[in-house]
Image (cartoon, rainbow, N blue to C red):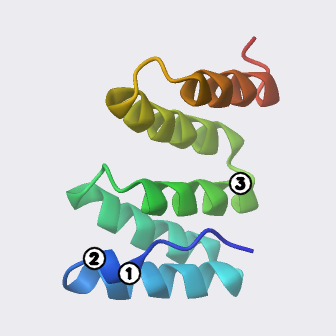
Amino acid sequence: MPIRPNPAEAPGGRAARCTLAVELMERGKLEDAEALFRLVLATEPGLKPVRMALSECLFKRGAWARAYENLKAVLQLDAETEPASPRARYERGLLDLLFGKL
């Protein structure tokens, strides 16, 4: 099941773009979905749900390196709000382990 950005929190066209991107991803139109997620993130890069949805899209496309970099950005957002949280350290370690960075 795809991670869905919360369009209720999004003003204007962002909600429509996120909803359409999720629908496109579910239908296998991954390049189009990625483009819409990136369009939203271009103006608001700190939207974690959208960044997580983009990561899922990249995984489905087999773009492992880009998915890894995108997930690191999500963890960085967490680190900025909770710099030394055990969860952030665990998630970063798990991500590094999955991608062979340890």
Measured in 3D between alpha carbons, the distance from the residue under mark 2 to the one under mark 1, in whole angstroms, is 5 Å
Residue at horizontal 35%, vertical 56%? Answer: 47
Q: Which residue is mark 1?
A: 7
**Marking on residue 10:** 2
The quadrant of the rendering that contains the N terminus is bottom right
Measured in 3D between alpha carbons, the distance from the residue under mark 3 to the one under mark 2, in whole angstroms, is 24 Å
Q: Are marks 3 and 1 in contact (CB under 8 Å)?
A: no
**SS for callout 3:** helix
Q: So how many labels did they put on this image?
A: 3
Q: Amino acid at mark 1?
A: Pro
> Does 79 appear above or below 61?
above
> Does 57 appear above or below 82?
below
Q: Nearer the viewer, mark 3 or mark 2?
A: 2
Residue furthest toward the top? Answer: 102
Which corner quadrant of the image does residue 43 belong to? Answer: bottom left
Image position, residue 11 (x, y; %) = 20, 80
**Marking on residue 59:** 3
Residue at horizontal 55%, vertical 74%? Answer: 4
Residue at horizontal 52%, vertical 33%? Answer: 72
Image position, residue 80 (x, y; %) = 33, 29
Q: Nearer the viewer, residue 61 or 95?
A: 95
Q: Amino acid at mark 2?
A: Ala
Q: Residues within 10 Å of mark 2 (few under 14, many from 20)?
A: some
> Does 92 appear above or below 58?
above
Measured in 3D between alpha carbons, the distance from the residue under mark 3 to the one under mark 1, in whole angstroms, is 22 Å
Q: Residues within 10 Å of mark 3 (few under 14, many from 20)?
A: some
Q: Nearer the viewer, mark 3 or mark 1?
A: 1
Q: Earlier in the sequence, mark 3 or mark 1?
A: 1
Q: Residues within 10 Å of mark 1 (few under 14, many from 20)?
A: some
Q: Amino acid at mark 3?
A: Phe
> Does 72 appear above or below 59?
above
